[in-house]
Amino acid sequence: MIEIKLVIVEDDKQLLKQISRILKREISEVYSLSSPEEALKRIPEIHPDIILSDINMPKMSGIEMYKELQNKNINIPIILASAFTEPKYFLEAIRLKVKNFIIKPINVDHLLSEIKNFEKELIEKKEYKTKDDLFVVQSRMAAMGEMLTNIAHQWKQPLNTISLCASSIQLDLELKPKNYEDEFPIYIDHIIDSVKYMSTTIEDFQDYLKPNKLETCFYLKETFKKVEKLIDAQCKTNNITIIKNITNTNFCSYQNELIQVILNILKNSIDELIKKEDLDKYIFIDVYNKDKDIIIEIKDNAGGIDPSIINLIFNPYFSTKKDKGTGIGLYMSKQIIENLNGKIEVDNSIYFYNNINYTGAIFTITLSPIKKELTIELEN
């Protein structure tokens, strides 16, 4: 049994009944519709996997019906059938990217063979989507783990401040010095400032982690400010300096997804720089426009990537961190950037900074502006 949903659109009711009866023996779900008008109403409800339609029907042809479905963003594969062989039908079918074009009278064995091949393609796509969804979940879980580590870094200093202020208040209460009333407000101010900082930190992480499937227009300078907040404590702890040269250009897309990519790259640089001793540690971020594209370059001075593996780093589950790495961060970064109408590349770079020769990895992200107009206002 072929496990798919098939819609048949045929105005000849006798032929419709006959072919439906035959196909129902081989296909799990078959829906018989006697006109394109009925099909346009029912297809959005049925959600079929594939459509088999006659071309020559009164009022509306099968090709016109398919165009109307596409205009409604209903992109379902279709097999068109016709007793006529005019080239215009073939040319139109090719232009509309129909699944297949068959000649009447329909050879049922040939039709079933085509549908079985389609079922195999469908199964492969579903398996691929399942694997891809798993990568997305694993990537977000890995990101959440890294974010929790960063929160711990961010909170160390304010927690120490709160602890010291509380101890000072307790000591002052015991000793009750003459100037206690003057000192007390200072302690309270320190505690309030620390709590505000911790609250802001949590909000920053929540903004990053919450799902956001809406396209927005945003300034890239603001995007990198959000990124820097998330890694600031870790960079300070490990004496890593971030040097930015960012053109204040705007981009319309999915900001959180772009932040995830940038964080993945920066986290890898930080991990490599932490291993280096007796070295001034730098990460350079350059953002500029080239023709109509936006270029983001991120490089470090951690020594670069082994040339023997540099072509593998975007592969799923490939990691140089052994049991500490998931091997999906850069793979997902590549998928995200390609979904944002862009590309990501990596190379090793040799450069001078402050009269010192450095070597490090350089990631280059090229983003092409989305063609359609977005009416969302830019973030301030």
Image: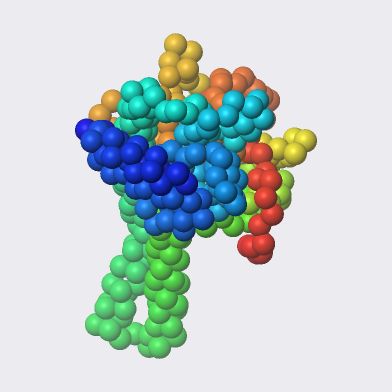
Q: Residue at x 44, y 28 (%)?
A: 105
Count of numbered badges drawn on the protein: 0
The C terminus sits in image quarter: bottom right
Choose between 146 and 153: the one closer to the eye.
146
**Could you say which quadrant of the image residue 183 lies in?**
bottom left
Report if residue 130 is visible in the image. Answer: no
In depth, the one of 354 and 273 nearer the eye is: 273
Q: Quadrant of residue 198?
A: bottom left
Q: Which corner quadrant of the image does residue 172 belong to?
A: bottom left
Name, please, the residue furthest toward the front.
Answer: 14
Q: Nearer the viewer, residue 198 or 327?
A: 327
Image coordinates for residue 244, horizontal then vertical, percent: 64, 43
Instruction: Specify the color scheme.
Output: rainbow
Residue at the right extreme, as displayed? 291
Q: Residue at x 50, y 21 (%)?
A: 304
> Could you tell me residue 51's position as x and y percent?
43, 41
Residue 110 visible in image:
yes
With 242 as the anchor, is 272 left or right in this view?
Answer: left
Image coordinates of residue 295 in percent, x first then y, are 66, 36
* Front residue of this view, candidates 92 and 272: 92
- Residue at the image point whose x is 38% and y is 85% from the top: 180
Instruction: Please state the horizontal and vertical placement of residue 213, each as a whole percent of the image.
Output: 48, 55
Question: Is 134 on the left or on the right of 278, as rendered?
Answer: left
Q: Is residue 20 above or below residue 41?
A: above
